[in-house]
Each structure stands twice: as structure tokens, then as C-alpha cells.
Amino acid sequence: MLTYAMEDRGGLPLYEYLYRCIRRDILSGALAAGERLPSKRALAEHLRLSVITVEGAYSQLEAEGYVYTRPKQGFFVCPVQQVPEPPRPAVIPPEPVPPVWKLDLARNQADSSRFPAATWARLTRQVLSEGSFLTPGPHQGLYALRRAIADDLRARKGMTVSPEQVVIGAGAEYLYILLAQLLGRQSVVAVEDPGYPKIRQVYRKYGVSCRPIPLDRQGMDPASLAASGATAVHLSPNHHYPTGTITTIGRRQTLLRWAEDQDATIIEDDYDSEFRFAGRPIPALQSIDTGGRVVYMNTYSQTISPSMRMGFMVLPPRLLERYRRELGFYACAVPVLDQHVLARFLSGGYYEQHLSRMRKEYRTRRDAVLAAFRSSPFAGRVTISEQGAGLHFLLRLDTALDDETLRQRAESLGVRLAFLSEYSTDPREAYAHTLVVNYGGLEPEHLAETMSLLAEVLAE
């Protein structure tokens, strides 16, 4: 007769504990194939359980194929492969806890405290009350959102875009993944050097070759691009991160001619271009593309919230057809509720109002930060390079210390720095001693403390 210590079941229901005990004996060979199990009533009396409890355990064993029944004969053990005792579970180290910095100038993101919470909550309640978010959305994303994005691009960027060309994705990195698959592993993608490292990391992870192309004051170097053998190019012409370079109209035209001649694709990553504080917005490269060579992409991580994993790309007709044919099986990775809310945020004019407020806020903050650096104790040893746009600028240091020494000193004082040399595959001397200062999280009331801490880091 099967005997088990039912009092050792812990928090498990009686039937589940009994089921586990019998299953263990079957897998270990203690109960042999073809062996008859005790009747439900006999086992219930032996273990002082209800017949219903034993019946529940036997039914689960039968459903999973550990036992079978013969009419009027009872339950019998099925032939199964014996399983050795499981090894001790591996010791999983805890996830590393990110350090808490007194000052973090390397984190490139907007101030989350400026999120338009009241408007967003009101629009969310509207969508929830209507129930439309319960219906699955199209593969390319909700049509209402794609239409709102197309209208916004037309109004702010001078782009002629149809909603059918827009593909919604869960942030920039997800869109990079889709583009890597769309371009194919045989592709060679030219990337800006220095440039955003994750672009190279994502493409290479998907087997796409990357060719770093140096920048000059007008943008990506055409001669290096022509010699690279690239079949596509990924760049940020309106405000490059981290150098801040704006690609000139002449260089843009050269890039478009190259794409036509080589039957190539240009990926225009318009990250961080909305915060331009002087003059009119720079038109998108896509707006002067007459050959359908440019894929335009952007996200809302800087303009609305860094936690909003929502972005989009605009595909030219020739790539749109290929996308639908080869990648159209992907479901949109952005929750439909969020898409509905963002669609109303855009079409209701709230996004433009929010951008206007944020430009004023960051213009004021940028002026205060630049003034603080120019009047700091180390002002005579730094040169600031900025283009009146974006949430970062470059700060070149006059120092004999190398970047790694400065980094270690800063970290020992609780300060996180980002160096231009980190963004390049070819760390030239021209990139040394240059900080990428991301000022989005610097509050004006804390600037005196910030300068004092940096003075300690940069002391000779």
C-alpha cells in the first residue's frame, strides 16, 4: 500500500500533494510500468483522506499520462522514462543594483517630473470608458495613431506622409531590430563615428555588418562612406548625438545621390531634434527625398517620458511592401490602450502645447547650466561646444589626466561622467578630455552644488 506523510504537504492542497508523491514514485521507478495502483477507496482509508481527494490526484495523473485505466480493474502505471534525482538548483546571483550617483551627467533623458500627468490621465479615462482599447490593433499600429503622427510630421517637419507608411514600435531599440531584419544579414550599414553605441550593438547582434564613418563639420564624410561598401546608412542629420553636428543641405544632397547611385537605404534617426532653441526647426532629410530612399524614425522618450516605450518609423513605398511581406506577421508590441491615448494627445493639440512648454523650460535650464559652467572655478580650463539644440553639449577639458583617470576619480566622488571617446570605435586624440554633458536632469537650484562637486573632480 502506498504510504505518504500527508502532514508534510506544506501549503499544498491534499490532492496535489498526493499527486506529486505518486508521480515522484513513478518517475523514480518505485512504481513500475503496468503496476496496479490501490483503489481510490482503499488508498483513501489507508491515508485517512476523502475519496474525492484521491480521485482528484488519480485524475491529474491520468490527464498527464502517468497512469491509465482499465474498465472495472482500476488504475495502472504507464511506461515512462525514469528521471534521476534533480540536481541542486544553481545559485543565481542577484541582479546588480545600479549605483546611486550624487551627480549623473551621463544619463541622457528628459526630466520625468515634467510629464503631463493630468492631461494623460484624463485622456486615459476617456479611452477606458469607451472600451475601444479591448480590440486588438493592426500589425503596424492603431490607424488613428498613425494618422495623428502623419499629421504631426506634416505640420512640424514638412513631411508628406500617409498613415499607411507609419509603423509603430516599442521604442528605438525595437525599431532597430525590425530594421536589421528588414535590411537583411547581407547588408552593410554605415554608422556615424562617434555615435550612439546601441545602434551598432543591435545591428551586429542580428548579424548585420557595421562600418563606422567619421564625421566632419558638415556631417558624415562622403569619401569614407563611398569607400565603405555600405548598402545602407544610419544617421541623425538634424542633431547628432553626441557631437551635436547638423548635416548641411549640401551634404544631405550628396547622401541622397549616393543612395540613388548605390540603390541604398538611408535611415534618418531623428532623435532629440525637437528641442531646438534658436531659429526654425531643421527640415527632415526625408522631406527632400524624391527617390523613396529614406526611412524616418523617431520616439517619444525625450519629448513625453523616458518610460514611454513608443516610437515609429516611416517607410518609403518600396520598403513598406517588403515589410508587409516579410515582417507583417509581427503584432504591434505597444499596448493598444497607450496607442489610443497618444493618438488623442497628438490630434488634440496637447503634444504641441507640451513641446512648447518643454522648449521654454529647457532653454531656461540650458542657459542657467551654461552660465554656471562659464562662471565655475574651472571655467578657465574648459571649452564649451553647443549648437543651441538638444539636451546635451560637449565640454572639452584642458587637463593632463586621461579619460580613465578622470572617470575613476569622478566615480570615487559619486559622479558619473560620459566621455566623447566612449562613443567612438576609433578613439582619436581629438576626442580625448571631452565630456558629453547631459543637462536634462540638472535642476537650476542645485547648480552651485553641482559646480562645487565637479571642481573637486577636475582639480589638477
Image (cartoon, rainbow, N blue to C red):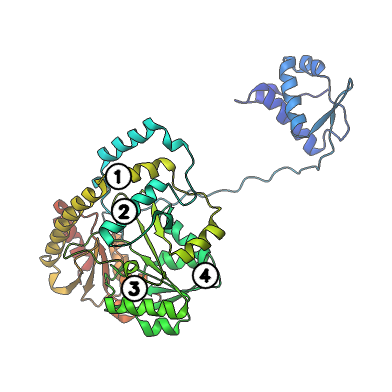
For disc 3, the neighbor class at 10 Å (few under 14, some 14 to 19, many from 20) is many
**What is the CA distance from the residue labelled 2 to the residue labelled 1?**
13 Å
Identify which residue is drawn at 30% across, 54% down: 152
Residue 164 x %, y %? 43, 55
Looking at the figure, which quarter contains the C terminus? Answer: bottom left
Circle 3: element type: helix
Labels 4 and 1: the sequence-earlier one: 4
**What is the CA distance from the residue labelled 3 to the residue labelled 1?**
39 Å
Mark seen at residue 151: 2
On screen, residue 162 versus residue 119, left or right, reads right
Q: Which residue was labeled with disc 4?
A: 208
Mark seen at residue 345: 1
Rendered view: 357 above or below 9: below
Q: Which residue was labeled with disc 3?
A: 421
Residue 121 x %, y %? 30, 37
Q: Amino acid at mark 2?
A: Asp
Q: Amino acid at mark 3?
A: Ser
Q: Nearer the viewer, mark 3 or mark 2?
A: 2
Q: Quadrant of residue 78?
A: top right
Q: Nearer the viewer, mark 2 or mark 1?
A: 2
Labels 3 and 1: the sequence-earlier one: 1
On screen, residue 297 versus residue 243, left or right, reads right
Residue 371 x %, y %? 11, 63
